[in-house]
Amino acid sequence: MIENISAVIITKNAFETISMTLESLEDFKEIIIFDSGSTDGTLDVIKTYGNVSLYSGDFQGFGETKNYAISLASNDWIFSLDADESLTKELSLHLCEIELKSKLIGEIQRKNFFMGGEMTYAGWGRDKIIRLFNRKDFCFSDMQVHEKVEVDSSAIKVLLKGSLKHLSINNLSDTLVKANLYSDLYAKEHDTFYPIIIIVFKAFYAFFRTYFLQRGFLAGWRGFVLAVSNSIGVFYKYIKIYARQKQKIKK
């Protein structure tokens, strides 16, 4: 049993994956979940797990919301993961045995899956991310999107055994939902204004980079869909800023 590390997750409409995530955390004595308005049955699933403490409130961007969620834990040592990620048994065993010491951070290899297939191209190679840390030493950046644990030169990095399985996209509609959400969050945080022709070029380049430079074409149809999705996401994050600025001028 992992008693000195709290697993922390933020959720919203994660019905398809949350059971897999919570099953992989069976060795944790405490799991903190902060939900920001699920309506799809996620809460019903969460309530069936006895080691989960459920909280709810407003979503304030990924960074700020995750920092609030980790403040709810009873332990200072935090294992942060998303509602579409699960631990391998090897990783869980390593967390049971690891010697926790000041400034230690745990880095984990994450395997990313898109529509049922593992992606190793299109910029979706097996990345290494920091998920284990002491909240007295480190925390998440306040970024609305693409937040990460901020560390300094004092951090002692340890590569944890095992890996995380990341079911990022499970159906095609997820690509549109994420593109809309992430572009909204980006537009709230930035005000860089580009002419339409530059926005179109940036969107085209996003496709070109993903499909050709990052060899997305080797992933077959999944690589093509991901390249198109990235292009759409780039287009909308800049066009939303453009539209906002134009509306201000008109007023």
Image (tube, rainbow, N blue to C red):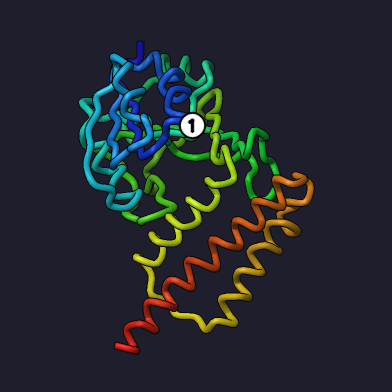
Residue 176: x percent and y percent?
Answer: 53, 53
Q: Residue at x 32, y 84 (%)?
A: 248
Asked if residue 45 is positioned above or below residue 62 in the image, the reply reads above
Q: Quick one: which residue is furthest to the front in this view? A: 40
Task: Describe residue 103's horizontal placement relative to residue 126 as left or right.
Answer: left
Residue 50: x percent and y percent?
Answer: 28, 14
Q: Residue at x 49, y 26 (%)?
A: 86
Q: Quick one: which residue is furthest to the top in this view? A: 1
Residue 164: x percent and y percent?
Answer: 53, 29
Task: Describe residue 76's horizontal placement relative to residue 231 as left or right.
Answer: left
Q: Does residue 70 appear in the picture of this structure?
A: yes
Residue 206: x percent and y percent?
Answer: 63, 64
Quadrant, the C terminus: bottom left
Q: Quick one: which residue is furthest to the bottom in this view? A: 250
- Mark 1 highlights which residue? 85
Q: Does residue 104 appear in the picture of this structure?
A: no
Determine the image quadrant of residue 74: top left
Quadrant, the N terminus: top left
Is disc 1 placed on a helix, strand or loop?
strand
Task: Describe residue 8's horizontal placement relative to residue 171 as left or right.
Answer: left
Instruction: Judge the density around disc 1: few (<14), some (14-19), many (≥20) Cα neighbours within 10 Å.
Output: many
Total numbered badges shown on the rendered structure = 1
Asked if residue 87 is positioned above or below residue 240 in the image, the reply reads above
Say what amino acid the circle numbered 1 marks: Glu
Task: Describe residue 29's horizontal placement relative to residue 13 as left or right.
Answer: left
Determine the image quadrant of residue 185: bottom left
Determine the image quadrant of residue 143: bottom left
Q: Residue at x 44, y 18 (%)?
A: 23
Q: Residue at x 28, y 48 (%)?
A: 59
